[in-house]
């Protein structure tokens, strides 16, 4: 597997294949995670600043998470909070599972048409706050426009229940709102983790989604969204 990531994720294929065979991931979802590591990926230059990759899977109940399988794959760390579990693996892959409201889509009747478990989004974690990484982060809207992706910015600080990052850019694949490929999150800044709930800034709905005009009433938290294209 070729990669442009600063951290070479040698374990990605083992984990993705195990979760696909077990049924937690669909093959096309695993393939999109691999796409993040490909030099031909539209955002490959930006990916060089990524410290890690995360895959966020929605489940009906946190008891549906294949904990035994994941632990047998040898994670470096495990974190649990109500409705949430994260397994962190050597090489930079974080598998996240949650059962709580995560996206604006979740609050719009009929917007979510996938059967759980499904990948809500995948992400590149741009933890370094230096000028090079910041420049990569700020280039995301222009890259999205040139490559036919849709984009939204989520101004910071951005809260995700028990964590906080400085800012987020979201990119939505070109093939349409309800295509197989999932939104890509670019999270900029150091991850701050809290023991108590600090807020909930929902993932913005794809602006091409046929129900996107209902998103204004489907917000939770202090995030401010700025659509670029």
Image: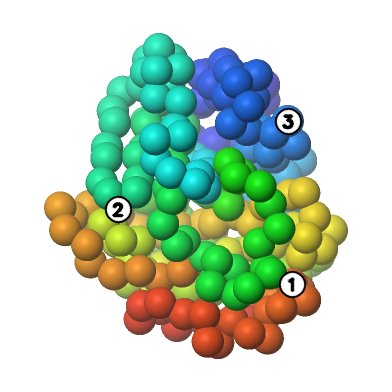
Q: CA distance from mark 2 to mark 3?
A: 29 Å
Residue 228, percent across and down? 65, 80
Tell which circle, 1 or 2, labels the residue nearer the N-terminal end: 2
Q: Is residue 41 above or below residue 177?
A: above
Residue 75, percent across and down? 36, 21
Q: Residue at x 59, y 81 (%)?
A: 215
Placement of the N terminus among the 4 image quadrants: top right
Q: Counting other residues with Cα less than 10 Å from the Cα at mark 3, is it few (<14), some (14-19), or many (20 or more)?
A: some
Q: Which residue is mark 3?
A: 27
Q: Which residue is mark 1?
A: 209
Front in this rendered view, residue 141 or 192: 192
Q: CA distance from mark 1 to mark 2?
A: 29 Å
Q: Residue at x 46, y 34 (%)?
A: 64
Tell which circle, 2 or 3, labels the residue nearer the N-terminal end: 3
Residue 25, percent across and down? 63, 33
User: In which quadrant of the rendered view does residue 226 lie?
Assistant: bottom right
């Amino acid at each position: 597997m070729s990669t442009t990531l600063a951290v070479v994720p040698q374990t990605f294929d083992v984990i993705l294949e195990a979760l696909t065979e077990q049924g937690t991931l669909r093959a096309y979802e695993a393939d999109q995670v691999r796409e993040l590591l490909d030099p031909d990926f539209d955002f490959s230059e930006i990916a060089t600043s990524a410290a890690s990759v995360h895959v966020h899977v929605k489940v009906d109940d946190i008891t549906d998470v294949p904990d035994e399988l994941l632990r047998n794959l040898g994670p470096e760390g495990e974190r649990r909070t109500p409705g949430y579990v994260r397994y962190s693996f050597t090489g930079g892959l974080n598998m996240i599972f949650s059962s709580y409201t995560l996206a604006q889509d979740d609050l719009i009747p009929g917007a979510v048409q996938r059967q759980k478990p499904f990948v809500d989004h995948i992400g590149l974690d741009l933890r370094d706050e230096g000028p090079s990484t910041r420049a990569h982060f700020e280039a995301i809207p222009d890259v999205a426009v040139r490559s036919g992706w849709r984009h939204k910015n989520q101004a910071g600080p951005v809260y995700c229940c028990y964590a906080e990052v400085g800012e987020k850019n979201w990119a939505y694949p070109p093939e349409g709102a309800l295509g197989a490929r999932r939104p890509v999150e670019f999270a900029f800044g150091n991850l701050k983790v809290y023991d108590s709930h600090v807020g909930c800034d929902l993932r913005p709905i794809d602006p091409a989604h046929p129900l996107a005009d209902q998103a204004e009433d489907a917000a939770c938290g202090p995030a401010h969204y700025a659509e670029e294209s």
